[in-house]
Amino acid sequence: MSDRLKAEREAAAARRSLLTQDAIERTGITEEMIGELVTRFYGRVREDALLGPVFATVQNWDEHLAKLRDFWSSVVLMSGRYHGSPMRAHLPLNLVGDHFDRWLDLFEQTAREVCPPAAAALFIDKARRIADSFEMASATVAGRIASPRHVLRS
């Protein structure tokens, strides 16, 4: 690796560390909080009439929850622990608007219960952006056009 590339990577890591520390200080998010949010939320998802059947294909929930904790840690704390392809995993599920709406309803309710307000706001903002991204990709694969509709949700 060249010295320049090494220096750029180190600078990027330092910036990421500062951003992560800022997010932690502003929101109070911890790995434990992420774990509680993921566990409680997906417990609700599994029992939900609309979403439960979508997730019925999960064979090993302990493994799946660990992957989801890594995903959310990477999203909100930039830990870099998640290395999957969430879009690829969700596209074959034929998800529609009602699925994304219900997913967000449950997620937002759970985030507000588990997290202090600043942390809940960050999780909710990220979740809305993810829902929009997934919904637009699902529509594209189905030959439709979808616009983002969750980011500005009240």
Image: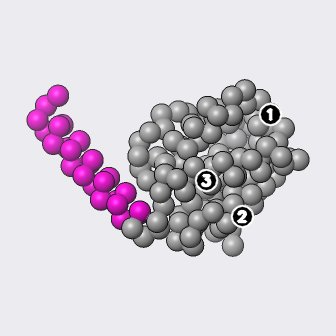
Q: Which mark is residue 109?
A: 2
Relative to 120, residue 88 above or below: above
Residue that appears at 43% across and 53% down: 77
Mark 3 or mark 1, earlier in chain: 3
Please state if 18 lies on the left or on the right of 77 as rendered: left
Three-letter residue code for mark 1: Ala
> Disc 1 designates what residue?
56
Disc 3 and disc 1: Cα gap in Å? 21 Å
Q: Which residues are magenta?
A: 1-24
Q: How is the image coloured?
A: one colour
Element type at marker 3? helix
Three-letter residue code for mark 2: Gln
Relative to 146, residue 59 above or below: above
Instruction: Quadrant for the C terminus, please.
Output: bottom right
Q: Main secondary structure of the magenta part?
A: helix
Residue that appears at 57% across and 49% down: 35
Three-letter residue code for mark 3: Glu
Disc 1 and disc 2: Cα gap in Å? 22 Å
Element type at marker 2? helix
In the image, residue 21 lies at what x, y percent?
34, 60
**Mark 3, mark 2: which one is toward the viewer?**
3
In the image, residue 8 lies at what x, y percent?
20, 44
Decide if residue 125 is in sight here.
Answer: no
> Disc 3 designates what residue?
36
How many residues crowd mark 1 within 10 Å: few (<14), some (14–19), many (20+)? few
Residue that appears at 84% across and 38% down: 53
How many residues crowd mark 2 within 10 Å: few (<14), some (14–19), many (20+)? few
How many residues crowd mark 3 within 10 Å: few (<14), some (14–19), many (20+)? some
Residue that appears at 63% across and 49% down: 38
Q: Quadrant of residue 60?
A: top right
